[in-house]
Image (cartoon, rainbow, N blue to C red):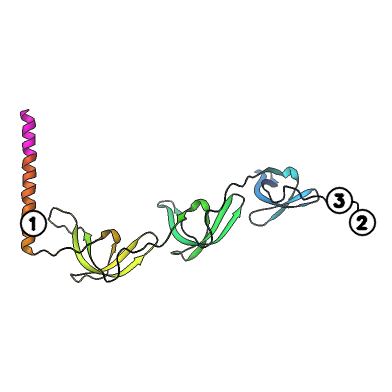
Amino acid sequence: MASNMSTRPQSKLVGQFANVKVGYNWKDGDEIIIAEIVRQEGTKFVARSQYGKEYHVEISDIRYLINITETPKYKIGDEVEAIVDYHQIGGEEYGFGKISEVKQFGNDIHYSVYIFKKTKTLSISQNNIKGRVSMKTAKYSQNQRVGVKHCNGHPYYYDEYVKNGTIVGINADYDSVTYAVNYDDGTKGIQVSESSITSPAIIKTPQQKKEEYTQFLQSEEQRLLQQLENVRSQMRN
């Protein structure tokens, strides 16, 4: 015999996220969590927490529904820069990694990110991901002849002194490229930044260096004499 009872339609609350009262204690009062309403059982609803625990609650325990406004900005396979730690003295620590999983619960979005230098996977909030990254491309190549700028206490009119050498190693990362350079003077494997590299310097003879320095001294002498004349002129006026 067929039942005359009509099947109750599924509540429109099922599938919604809400702030739900799931308990009470005398010290802190109502225990409220964000939960997903997964089904209705009789007059009660089953609310599931972010960690998979289910609670049977009355409709009066559902305080208010949450409007879902956030969507994942990144996907599995994306390489990103993210905040991976915080130090009281140094502040935020950033790292580079690859997303292996995307998890969303309401407006809370987290990613499982394998951090390359830490060689482990961390759960990172979307708010702590700075953006997508890609491996830097080296501007110079292996075995290329280059000049390297550095301060060497040189007594000329420029502060940067260029030493010539050959690139013997390249280390490309997500934030910078460095090079190992063997200098012509015999120093080997010196690590330098890409910004320090320039064209090889023209090797000057001792006589050329002497003439260059003489010109520098003459120009500095003229500059100082002109400054003195300017001061005297101002005093006369």
Please name the residue that numbered disc 3 is placed on: 6
Q: Is residue 27 visible?
A: no
Q: State whether residue 13 is above or below residue 115.
A: above
- Secondary element at image label 2: loop
- Secondary element at image label 1: helix
Is residue 236 inside the magenta stretch?
yes
Residue positioned 68% across, 56% down in the render: 53
Count of numbered circles on the image: 3
Residue positioned 42% across, 61% down in the render: 134
Give amino acid for label 2. Ala
- Secondary element at image label 3: loop
Image marks 2 and 3: residues in contact by CB distance under 8 Å: no
Q: Which residues are magenta?
A: 227-237
Q: State whether residue 65 is above or below residue 205.
A: above
Give amino acid for label 1. Glu
Please name the residue that numbered disc 1 is placed on: 212
